[in-house]
Every structure is written in C-alpha cells, then in structure tokens.
C-alpha cells in the first residue's frame, strides 16, 4: 500500500509536468483592441492587503479600450477607502467608482458586495478579481480575448492562475510556496485529466451579464464559501465551459502568524472538501515525502526505499521548476524550494485537520460550513 502511494506521488509529479507542458504550448490569438467590448472591472474590498495601492494602480495602466473600475466596501470606515480615493486623484480621466455596499445579502460579504456593484456596472462584459491581485498591462486584453474568442465553444467564464508574493515572514513564504508548488500544478493537472477547467479562481472571474443571469444571478452564491468554484459549476451544469487565460497574475501574501496561516489553510482545505470531495481525496498522492519516510521506516531503511525517495525528490523538484518557474513564471517559488520539506510535512497534517470540523475563519469573521454554505458564528 505504501509502495503504491510512493509510486503514485512520483507519477503525479510527472503528470503535472506533462500538464504544464500541454498548457504552455497552447497558442491563442489576441483579438485587436478595437474588436474587444467595453468591460466593467469589479473589486470587492475589506481592509488593506500588502502593496495594495500598486495592485490597484496596475488596473489603471491596461493596454485596452474602454473599461470602468468599481471598488466596493461594506463599511464607510473601511481602511481601503483612502487608497481608492488616491487612485481617483492620480487617474482623473479613468472611470473609477467607489461604492459603499451597505446591504448584507448573505454571509458571503464578498459576493454581497459584488451583487450590489454589478447593479451599478455599465457594461455587458464583467471581470471580478480579489483585492490583492496585481495584473500585467495586457491582462484585460488577454482575459477578454479568451472570453470573446471562446464564445463559439461555449466558454462563459475565464479565470487565471496566480503567483504568491510573500514577505520575509516564514509563514508568508510557506503560504506562497503552497500556491506555486502545490496549487498551480494541481490546477493544471486537473485541467489536463478532466479535459477542461472545472473550477474558477478568485484571482479572476470574467463573464457576461447574460451568463450571470442564466444561473439566476450571483445572488444565488451569497451563502457559499467557494463562490468562485460554485460559479464555474453552475455554468458547467448549463453546458458552458470555463477556460484558463494564459496570463498569470500576482497575489500578495500577508505577514501571517502561525495561527493566521493555519486558519487560511483550514479554510481552503475545508472549502475543497465540501465543494469537490473527489479532489480532496485526490490530494493523497501529493504527500510523497510523507509516504517516502513511512516506506523507509517500514522497510528498515532498505536500499530500494532510499531510491524511491530519491526519485520522488527529483520528480518533485522537476515539477516545481517546470510548472512554477517555467510555465507560471514564479521565480520566488523556485528560490524557496529549500522550504519544500517543511511545506510537504505540514500539508498532510493540514489535510487531516481539514477532514474534521466545519469551522472557518475568514477576514476576521468566524463561520461554520454546512454543505458548502456559510453560517456566521461571530
């Protein structure tokens, strides 16, 4: 059994390389800017994130035609408001709106904000991304080209991979390492095995108002934790498709305490467990270092167990180098590869902890999960 798990870990890492190569060799033409529709970009906010102003600013220097930026907070005293006002002063020619979304439509305050922001948006094509996302200048053109160009293939949602940019804090580095070394390869492997994208990511959700209305509106997601996944799943049930844009965006990881790191990992793990149970079980082959160590102990340090561990380590490093560094352009993950052993031993513990309990902490609020839906505790 342990030997099979070790073999599956090696095979999984090789699979991520094949999946990354398959993604990297795809070529999609960018549509001329003049042919692209105007876009409403919605950014729900709560509090401040690292390097937030520069992330906001990156949305104002897009190589694109007409678009508006709408920022939404749920508290008129939110500390992100002065940053939006500064952005409005720096870019007076841009259509930048700030909304206080004071209605509480459900426990997922992000979706509650987006629903109210969407009502004020002018355009048919919409892009929603998280507050901490920084984008390159060709981001909107790439994302909207993928959405418009894929319309005949029933592409109704476009999302983006992302790179974690850590601080010098250990827990911040381990969080970012999980994004580059685990999450990105898993996304590409899932896309390859399932022959399509069966998820959405908060880093980017691009869709049309027509598609949003077809699923009953975003209001139907306001009770869910994994609203990005649920949006993709609802569209898939209607026969539409989700696609990954080629652009990879950045997310800036905060200075975590151990408790903050654990809370975030448990929120993510429990979200996957309730949204995609098969994928949650499918994480087991990712714990190759654990299985290699167990195999060493079980065989009394037999030579072939050491060889198996060596092959796993080489496959793991090859996956990180090719998928994170070469495909996603994530140089920081490759430079932090020396921390992989710590991350790889923490991951099985977090997986087990996520298996039990339904409590999550999200942006300072505490909830319980019931069938993927949020119920506020405090």
Image (cartoon, helix red, strand yellow):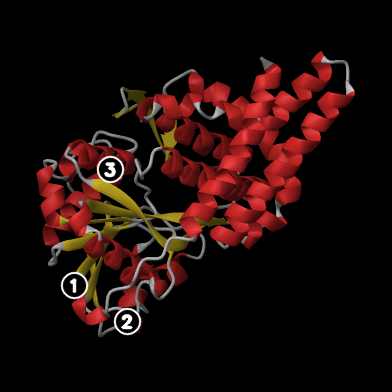
Of the numbered discs in the image, which one, if any, rests on residue 267? none
Residue 363 seen anywhere in this rendered image of the structure: no
Of the numbered discs in the image, which one, if any, rests on residue 38? 1
Q: Residues within 10 Å of mark 3 (few under 14, many from 20)?
A: many
Query: Regarding mark 2 in the picture, which secondary structure is present there?
Result: helix
Residue 192 location in percent, x, y? 44, 43
Q: Residue at x 14, y 41 (%)?
A: 215
- Rendered-image quadrant of the N terminus: top right
Q: Residues within 10 Å of mark 1 (few under 14, many from 20)?
A: some
Residue 63 seen anywhere in this rendered image of the structure: yes
Question: Which of 47/232 is in front?
Answer: 232
Q: Is residue 34 above or below residue 352?
A: below
Residue 268 location in percent, x, y? 46, 36
The mark closer to the camera, 2 or 1, is: 1
Q: Is residue 38 above or below residue 206?
A: below
As measured in the structure, the alpha-carbon distance from the residue carrying label 2 to the one carrying label 1 is: 23 Å
Q: Residue at x 48, y 47 (%)?
A: 188
Query: Regarding mark 3 in the picture, which secondary structure is present there?
Result: helix
Query: Regarding mark 1 in the picture, which secondary structure is present there?
Result: loop
Residue lying farthest to the bottom in this orientation: 93
Answer whether labels 2 and 1 touch (C-beta < 8 Å): no
Dot 3 corresponds to which residue?
232
As measured in the structure, the alpha-carbon distance from the residue carrying label 3 to the one carrying label 2 is: 36 Å
Answer whether labels 3 and 1 touch (C-beta < 8 Å): no
Of the numbered discs in the image, which one, if any, rests on residue 89? 2
């Amino acid at each position: 059994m342990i030997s099979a798990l070790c073999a599956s870990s090696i095979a999984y890492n090789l699979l991520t390389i094949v999946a990354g190569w398959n993604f990297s060799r795809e070529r999609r033409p960018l549509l001329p800017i003049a042919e692209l529709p105007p876009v409403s970009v919605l950014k729900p906010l709560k509090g401040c994130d690292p390097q937030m102003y520069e992330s906001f600013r990156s949305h104002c220097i897009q190589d694109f035609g007409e678009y508006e930026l709408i920022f939404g907070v749920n508290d008129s005293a939110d500390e992100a408001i002065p940053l939006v006002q500064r952005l409005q002063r720096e870019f007076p020619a841009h259509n930048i709106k700030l909304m206080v979304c004071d209605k509480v439509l459900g426990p997922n305050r992000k979706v509650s904000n987006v629903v109210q922001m969407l009502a004020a948006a002018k355009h048919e094509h919409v892009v929603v991304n998280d507050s901490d996302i920084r984008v390159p200048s060709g981001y909107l053109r790439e994302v909207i080209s993928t959405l418009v160009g894929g319309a005949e293939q029933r592409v109704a949602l476009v999302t983006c991979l992302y790179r974690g940019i850590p601080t010098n804090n250990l827990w911040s580095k381990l969080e970012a390492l999980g994004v580059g070394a685990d999450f990105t390869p898993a996304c590409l492997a899932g896309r390859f095995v399932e022959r399509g994208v069966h998820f959405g990511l908060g880093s980017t959700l691009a869709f049309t108002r027509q598609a949003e209305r077809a699923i009953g509106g975003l209001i139907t997601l306001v009770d869910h934790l994994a609203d990005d996944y649920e949006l993709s799943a609802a569209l898939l049930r209607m026969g539409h498709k989700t696609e990954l844009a080629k652009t990879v965006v950045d997310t800036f990881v905060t200075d975590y305490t151990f408790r903050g790191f654990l809370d975030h990992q448990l929120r993510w793990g429990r979200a996957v467990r309730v949204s995609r149970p098969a994928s949650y079980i499918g994480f087991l082959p990712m714990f190759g270092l654990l299985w290699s160590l167990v195999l060493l102990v079980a065989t009394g340090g037999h030579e072939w167990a050491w060889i198996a561990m060596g092959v796993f380590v080489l496959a793991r490093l090859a996956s990180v180098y090719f998928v994170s560094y070469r495909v996603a352009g994530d140089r920081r993950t490759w430079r932090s590869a020396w921390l992989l052993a710590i991350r790889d031993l923490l991951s099985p513990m977090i997986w087990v902890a996520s298996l039990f309990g339904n409590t999550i902490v999200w942006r300072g609020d505490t909830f319980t999960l019931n069938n993927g839906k949020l119920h506020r505790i405090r």
